[in-house]
Amino acid sequence: MTDLLNVRHLTTRFQTPDGLVHAVNGISFQIYPGETIGIVGESGSGKTMAMMSILRLLPGTAKAISTGEVWFESRDLLKLSEAQMRQIRGSSLAVVFQNSLSALNPVLRIEKQLTEAMTRHLGLTATAAQKRALELLDAVGIPDAKNRIRHYPHQFSGGMRQRVAIAMGIACNPKLLIADEPTTALDVTIQAQIVDLIKHLKAEMGMAALWITHDLALLAGFADRIFVMYAGQIVEQAPLRQLYYEPRHPYTIGLLQSLPRLDADQPQRLQAIEGFPPDLMHYPQGCPFAARCPYVIDRCHHEDPILESVGDDHTVACWVKPSYN
Ligand SMILES: Nc1ncnc2c1ncn2[C@@H]1O[C@H](COP(=O)(O)OP(=O)(O)O)[C@@H](O)[C@H]1O
Ligand SMILES: [Mg+2]
């Protein structure tokens, strides 16, 4: 199958007054049409910077430099002009941020924001765009859409506003939706509703999704494949079940041990991973997880492991590759 997105050796560095930040360190992966990918990792592991690099939305003030290749629909996004990039974002490549308030224009009614995108990218007439805007709000579960469409962003609750942002994201039938912690600020019930909504929309529209989260449990029964990020690298990559049942990277094992197990028959003590991720301004020599790793061997302190195959579509960057269980 032809991939939809093919990221090759993507690296992003920031120049700051205090030094160079190694935010994204040579990540490579593919996403196929209709697939849902989960990217998981602790806060500060480079998830947002990786996504912003792909979308070419790195903050201009940060003096960021990305190298590598980001192939999407036969074009390398890193080589496109800003105008070409704007055309792709908001049409075939859509994004939903953690805080949609920043993505929505506070002084425009949501009707205007939704219809503008569709008249611009899909060439719809004003009437057709208005009809579809109502359908979209219905589809994302906003009650009384006919009325609500006249409202401004601040008149919606956090959960409803995330739904509006998702409606905006999917308005132009994207092939890929990138969502960066879209439910993190919301309570658990609304989180579950939004996960269901994305699942439903994905099945209906055949859209692929890249879902970024720090919460591995959230991805269960939802993602097709999972990428685990640590210190700006992908350290393990596997289909969902494989990753949950046969993880081979000590960091993934640590993440799983810090989750409550529903099938446990007695009270469990959850183990948090000790220590902290490395300071990306002082990138360590060797494996970036070595300082926290219970399986560490001498080699880990000198040589950074590369991703190696350990099974069908399962790769791990670790010299030890311990088995879990
Ligand atoms: N504007 C910036 N300037 C310099 N460094 C930054 C900037 N934004 C993020 N970083 C650094 O990049 C690293 C990765 O951050 P981020 O991608 O936001 O992590 P995550 O999304 O996984 O929590 C962090 O170490 C952070 O300090
Ligand atoms: Mg983030």
Image (tube, rainbow, N blue to C red):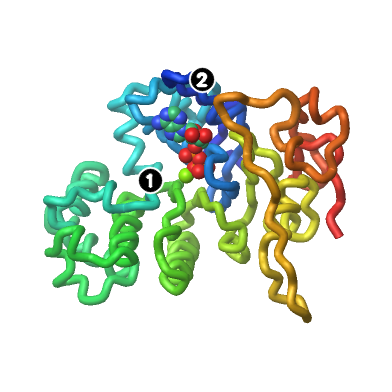
* Image x and y of residue 244, in percent: 73, 59
In the foreground, 80 or 301: 301
Of badges 1 and 2, the one in the foreground is 2
Determine the residue positioned at 31% across, 63% down.
158
Q: Which residue is mark 2?
A: 20
Q: Which residue is mark 1?
A: 94
Mark found first going from the N terminus, 1 or 2: 2
Determine the residue positioned at 72% across, 46% down.
251
In the foreground, 293 or 118: 293
* Image x and y of residue 221, in percent: 61, 66
Q: Relative to 134, is 82 on the left or the right?
A: right
- Asked which secondary structure carries label 2, the reply is strand
**How many residues crowd around disc 1 within 10 Å: few (fewer than 14), some, or many (20 or more)?**
many
Residue type highlighted by circle 1: Ala
Q: Relative to 75, is 272 on the left or the right?
A: right
* Image x and y of residue 246, in percent: 80, 55
Question: Looking at the rendering, which quadrant does residue 231 occupy?
Answer: top right
Cα gap from disc 1 to disc 2, whole angstroms:
30 Å
Q: Judge whether 149 appears above or below 242 on screen.
A: below
Residue type highlighted by circle 2: Leu
Q: Is mark 2 within 8 Å of ligand 1?
A: no
